[in-house]
Image (cartoon, rainbow, N blue to C red):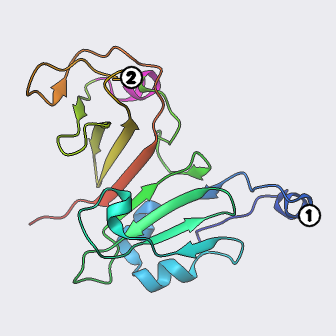
Amino acid sequence: MFLLACDASSNQAKEKGEIQKSLPINVEKILNEMDKNTFLTSFSEEYNISHPFLHEYGVDSESKGILVSTEFDPMVFAWSKWDSDSLYEIQVLSEKVELKSNIHVGMSVEEFINHYPDSKLYLNALDENSEYFIIKDNFEYIVEFLTNPQSRIGKYSNDQYETEILINTGKKADKISIRKITNG
């Protein structure tokens, strides 16, 4: 099984009541090969599974998704389109989730720009408390930062949702949404 929740010290940590350090996730395998049921059964019993509404995670829908969490931390949220059993998107919500890339929740804007210097920052047109970068390869990665007018990362002109001027490069990523790029 590729969704592992254990490391060498996890049994000792469990005995002490500590939270595990990480949850490695193979996003490519999940999005390419798993349906909702396989995804659900791939987690060990130490993770809590719940089914919150998609709109609670920024998706315009009354359907429900799959939230995987520890006792104290939400880890990942996954969802599929209403007419499909295939997962459409995975949202990484915790620094404890390890991705197979050089992006992660908790990375700073400066760290992100060092890896992706040509990236553009956008202000979310539907929720102006969110700014994000997009990376595309085999998947689309949306690296999201929760902000407000006083803590903006970028400087925006009226009616403009893209910036080239970064003013708060210390802000850390709050969420990473990953979806498979499809043709059509």
Residues 100 and 174: in front is 174
- Quadrant position of the N terminus in the picture: bottom right
Residue under the point 18% across and 64% down: 182
Residue 150 versus residue 44 in the image, above or below = above
Residue at 72%, 72% in the rendered image: 46
Question: Considering only vertical position in the picture, is 10 above or below 114?
Answer: below
Quarter location, residue 90: bottom left
Is residue 106 one of those drawn in magenta? no
| Res. 25 visible in picture | no
Q: Position of residue 92 (x, y in %)?
A: 47, 54
From what the image shows, is residue 49 above or below residue 147? below
Secondary structure at numbered mark 2: loop
Q: In the figure, residue 23 lies in which quadrant?
A: bottom right
| Earlier residue among tags 1 and 2 | 1
Label 2, residues with CA under 10 Å away: few <14, some 14-19, many ≥20: few
Q: Position of residue 180 (x, y in %)?
A: 28, 62
Distance CA(mark 1)–CA(mark 2): 41 Å
Along the horizontal axis of the image, is 70 left or right of 175? right
Q: Which residues are magenta?
A: 110-117
Name the residue tied to disc 1.
Answer: 15
Q: Specify whether 110 is left or right of 130.
A: right
The numbered dot on residue 151 is 2
Amino acid type, mark 2: Ser
Q: Residue at x 86, y 59 (%)?
A: 17
